[in-house]
Every structure is written in structure tokens, then in C-alpha cells.
Image (cartoon, helix red, strand yellow):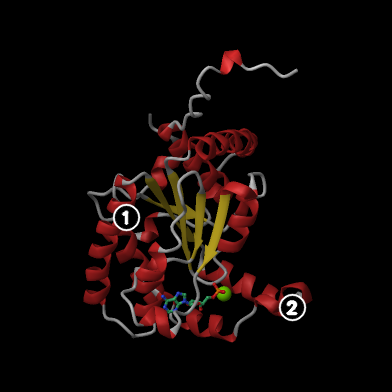
């Protein structure tokens, strides 16, 4: 069934330009459309919780959600919003920073594989193996060809995950350059956000175009039927959250996790 969010899906067989997705797409919606999407989001959050419980009870498969965005793109707040309503016991969030010496002494997927959610869990990667084909490209530690070669390894890796029951959903949160400026300024001005400010964000901002080129290559080289990318217009937080939530619910519905069968002879047991 075709969904309204499908327009943000990166098809495996066609190259998508990031510019095709307006970060301010939400602004083109009517008031009525907005109300409908916001109401549906509440239903989706409730359904997500129910599906998550079945996934946890079934304990044979897992779901991995990958977030990719430029600084201030909204990764942390997406995690906060979407997972506030689900059971923390069956959900694990992993952030990836600059690789340690030990991590650097291995292949780039070594530290990633180790953090893939176990059966029954929903895992969220706040940054991921996609830093190894984007940030690294922007800072000059690898070139484009090496990045594309790594994407080939990523496709094989994600196929392995899928084949053993770990479904993968990937979201590129797309904000505009102006929105990033507003959010960075906010971090400088709001004392409760000072802790989030990192001077390196400003250097990253100077390389906006290089980031976009690397994101575009990465999502196009690695969007597959099994592990698709959505490019999410993310200037409006409510719209971003609605899209991500809907995509997760859709995938979990398709996975259709089942409660395991009860112990044998359940009907013979009595609580006295
Ligand atoms: P944050 O997510 O804001 O806490 O910052 C994490 C930092 O780690 C960012 O500056 C990323 O660019 C950096 N980082 C994450 N993964 C990698 C990687 N594979 N190679 C280089 N830098 C990375
Ligand atoms: Mg940061």
C-alpha cells in the first residue's frame, strides 16, 4: 500500500537529489492536513508501543533505526520524542563519537556490529557507520571512491543483519542552512543549551556543500528494499517526528511480530 510518506523514500533504483526534498515541506500543508497528521501521530505512538511489546515477547527479530543528519539536524530530539512513549526496557540508544584508538585499529564496521540490537529489541543509532562515509569524507580522511567502496560493504553488512532478522530503517534528517543557523544561535544564546554547543559545529557549517554531497552519495548508494532510507524534511519538528514514527510503525506492522506460544498445557494450571 502506498503511504503519504513514500514520497520521502529513496528508491533503490533511482538517484535522488537531496534538493528534491524541501526541508520546509510541512509549510505547504493545509491546516486540516496538519491536524490529521498530528492526530495520526498520536495513534501511531500508541500502536508503536503495542507492536514493540510483541517484538519483545517474540524475541526472534530486532529493529535497528539509523539517524543521519548535519549538526543541529535534530537527531537527539527525534530520539527523545519518538521513544518517550515506548518501553525503555526493550529499547537501546547508541551514540557514536570519534573512534577510539582500538576502534580505529579495526575495520569501520567492527564497533558498529557490536552495538546492533539483540533479538526482541529496538535499537537506535544516533550517528552510525554512516559517519564513516560522510564526516570522514568532509574532513578529508577518505576520498569519494573510498566512501563509495565502504557503501558497498555497508550494503552487504545490512543484508546480513536483515537476513538474520534485524530489520534496518534509516532516516536522513534534512534541515536548511538557515534553520541550522537559527539552532546554532539558539545554542549560543540559551543558557540551557550552552552544553550542546561545540565550536567544531561552526567549522562543519563552513563545509555545508561537502556534507550535502556526502549525504547524497551515502543515501543513494545504500537505500535497498531491506534497509531503505527516508529523507525527512526536518525544519518542522512535528512533521519530522510524524514521518519517522509512521515509517517505524509501517515496518513493524509488516514484520508482524507474534507472541510466542504459551507453555504446554496452560489450561491445566490453576492459581489457588
Ligand atoms: P555528538 O554526536 O554531537 O556528541 O558528536 C560526536 C562527534 O563524533 C561528532 O563530531 C562526529 O563528527 C564525530 N564522529 C562520529 N563518528 C565518527 C567517525 N566514524 N569518524 C570521525 N568522527 C566521528
Ligand atoms: Mg554535536
Mark 2: which secondary structure? helix
Q: State whether residue 258 is above or below residue 231.
A: above
Dot 1 or dot 2, earlier in sequence = 1
Q: State whether residue 74 is above or below residue 238.
A: below
Q: Residue furthest top?
A: 267
- Residue displayed at 59% across by 13% down: 268
Q: Would you say 149 lies left or right of 100 here?
A: left
Q: Nearer the viewer, residue 165 or 212?
A: 165
User: Residue 104: which numbered mark, if any?
Assistant: none
Q: Quadrant of ligand 2?
A: bottom right
Question: Which residue is labeled 1 in the image?
Answer: 158
Q: For residue 71, say whether it is visible.
A: yes
Q: Residues within 10 Å of mark 1 (few under 14, many from 20)?
A: some
Q: Would you say 111 lies left or right of 226 here?
A: right
Q: State whether residue 163 is above or below residue 135.
A: above
Q: Residue furthest right?
A: 191
Question: Which residue is labeled 2 in the image?
Answer: 189
Q: Residues within 10 Å of mark 2 (few under 14, many from 20)?
A: few
- Residue displayed at 33% across by 77% down: 106
Q: Would you say 204 lies left or right of 181 here?
A: left
Amino acid at each position: 500500500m502506498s503511504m503519504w510518506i513514500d514520497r520521502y523514500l529513496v528508491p533503490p533504483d533511482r538517484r535522488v537529489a537531496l534538493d528534491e526534498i524541501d526541508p520546509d515541506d510541512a509549510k505547504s500543508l493545509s491546516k486540516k492536513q496538519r491536524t490529521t497528521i498530528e492526530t495520526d501521530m498520536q495513534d501511531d505512538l500508541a500502536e508503536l508501543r503495542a507492536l514493540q511489546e510483541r517484538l519483545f515477547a517474540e524475541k526472534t527479530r530486532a529493529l535497528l533505526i539509523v539517524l543521519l543528519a548535519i549538526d543541529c539536524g535534530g537527531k537527539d530530539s527525534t530520539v527523545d520524542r519518538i521513544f518517550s512513549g515506548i518501553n525503555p526496557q526493550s529499547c537501546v540508544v547508541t551514540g557514536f563519537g570519534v573512534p577510539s584508538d582500538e576502534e580505529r585499529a579495526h575495520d569501520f564496521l567492527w564497533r558498529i556490529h557490536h552495538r546492533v540490537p539483540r533479538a526482541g529489541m529496538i535499537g537506535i543509532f544516533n550517528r552510525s557507520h554512516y559517519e564513516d562515509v560522510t564526516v570522514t569524507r568532509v574532513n578529508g580522511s577518505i576520498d569519494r571512491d573510498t566512501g563509495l567502496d565502504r557503501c558497498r560493504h555497508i550494503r552487504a553488512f545490512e543484508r546480513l543483519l536483515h537476513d538474520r532478522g534485524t530489520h534496518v530503517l534509516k532516516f536522513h534528517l534534512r534541515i536548511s542552512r538557515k534553520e541550522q543557523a537559527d539552532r546554532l544561535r539558539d545554542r549560543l544564546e540559551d543558557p540551557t543549551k550552552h552544553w550542546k554547543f561545540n565550536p567544531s559545529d561552526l567549522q562543519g557549517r563552513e563545509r555545508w556543500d561537502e556534507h550535502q554531497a556526502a549525504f547524497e552519495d551515502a543515501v543513494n548508494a545504500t537505500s535497498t528494499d531491506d534497509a531503505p532510507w527516508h529523507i525527512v524534511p526536518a525544519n518542522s519538528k512535528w512533521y519530522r517526528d510524524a514521518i519517522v514514527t509512521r515509517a517505524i510503525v509501517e515496518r513493524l506492522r509488516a514484520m508482524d511480530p507474534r507472541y510466542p506460544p504459551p507453555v504446554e498445557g496452560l489450561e491445566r494450571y490453576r492459581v489457588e
